[in-house]
């Protein structure tokens, strides 16, 4: 029986909500359900879930926009978000991860396999949280990264970082000058069980550079990336 983790289901199909809700409750999870992106965002702030299973295609506010809105909420910045959708195209997966998703699960999927994916996500989050809690404040000139507060400031101005961008920045900045291979980044940030598009890391790196500048993160062509501080205190 799974631990009593809280899971929020967001889907506009009532039959899917009923089936998932029943199946996951039987596995020991505490479940709340929402039938739209707006309702899901409001409920997430009250329910404080450990994980959100989010449909991609919904009328009105779709799953991508819902994910982006949730990631901007200060008290929900580190919640796990997994897209559960029938859309399997590469561009849909890239859009999901770019919006801040932690996993992309394609329907149909057997309940036991879904539970396995959920448990893997929760274990990886616990491991990541422990690692972040041990980290110190990272200062590189006017760039300051606070792992405990999920906060990045540039010249005193706070910058918004979705969860995966923040974790990727921490991974690189915590070991200045050390090259991280693409395989290492995939395994640490997304996990071995997650299948993502080849361009996902590149998209995240580009977005990080847009916020902190082009000079900190260097590309090692065909291999990976490394963080080189301009100045360090």
Image (cartoon, helix red, strand yellow):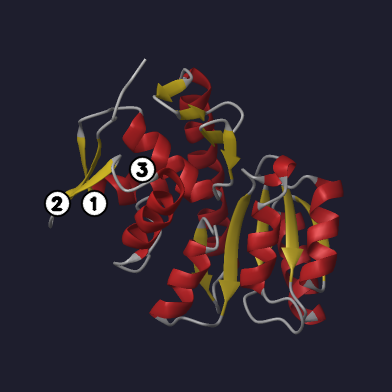
Q: What element carries label 1?
A: helix
Dot 2 or dot 1, earlier in sequence: 1
Q: How many numbered marks appear?
A: 3
Residue 208 percent location from the top left of the image = 42, 50
Q: Mark 2 points at which residue?
A: 223
Q: Residue 182 carries which label?
A: 1
Residue 172 percent location from the top left of the image = 32, 37
Q: Name the residue under label 3.
A: 188
**Camera-nearest label, 3 or 2:** 2
Left or right of 10 on screen, residue 77? left
State which quarter of the image contains the N terminus.
top right
What is the C-alpha distance between the residues marked 3 and 1?
A: 10 Å
Q: Residues within 10 Å of mark 2 (few under 14, many from 20)?
A: few
Q: Residues within 10 Å of mark 1 (few under 14, many from 20)?
A: some
In the rendered structure, are the residues bearing label 2 and label 1 in contact, judged by CB atoms less than 8 Å apart? Answer: yes
Dot 3 or dot 2, earlier in sequence: 3
In the rendered structure, are the residues bearing label 3 and label 2 in contact, judged by CB atoms less than 8 Å apart? Answer: no
Using the image, determine if residue 184 lies above or below residue 14: above
Using the image, determine if residue 148 lies above or below residue 31: above
Q: Which of 123 and 2 is in front in this view?
A: 123
Residue 137 percent location from the top left of the image = 48, 20
Q: Is mark 2 on a helix, strand or loop?
A: loop
Q: Residues within 10 Å of mark 3 (few under 14, many from 20)?
A: some
């Amino acid at each position: 029986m799974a631990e009593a983790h809280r899971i929020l289901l967001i889907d506009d199909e009532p039959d899917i909500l009923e089936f998932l809700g029943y199946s996951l409750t039987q596995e020991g999870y505490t479940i709340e359900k929402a039938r739209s992106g707006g309702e899901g965002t409001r409920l997430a702030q009250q329910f404080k879930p450990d994980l959100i299973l989010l449909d991609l295609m919904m009328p009105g506010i779709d799953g991508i926009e819902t994910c982006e809105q949730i990631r901007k909420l200060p008290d929900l910045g580190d919640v796990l978000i997994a897209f559960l959708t029938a859309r399997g195209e590469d561009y849909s997966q890239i859009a999901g991860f770019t919006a801040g998703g932690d996993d992309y699960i394609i329907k149909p999927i057997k309940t036991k396999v879904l539970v396995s994916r959920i448990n893997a996500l929760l274990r990886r989050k616990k491991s990541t949280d422990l690692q972040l809690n041990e980290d110190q404040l990272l200062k590189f000139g006017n760039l300051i990264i606070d792992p405990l507060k999920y906060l990045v400031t540039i010249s005193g101005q706070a910058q918004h970082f979705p969860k995966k961008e923040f974790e990727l920045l921490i991974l690189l900045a915590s070991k200045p000058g050390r090259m991280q291979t693409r395989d290492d980044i995939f395994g640490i940030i997304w996990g071995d069980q997650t299948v993502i598009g080849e361009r996902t890391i590149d998209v995240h790196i580009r977005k990080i550079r847009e916020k902190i500048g082009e000079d900190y993160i260097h590309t090692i062509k065909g291999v990976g990336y490394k963080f080189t501080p301009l100045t360090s205190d």
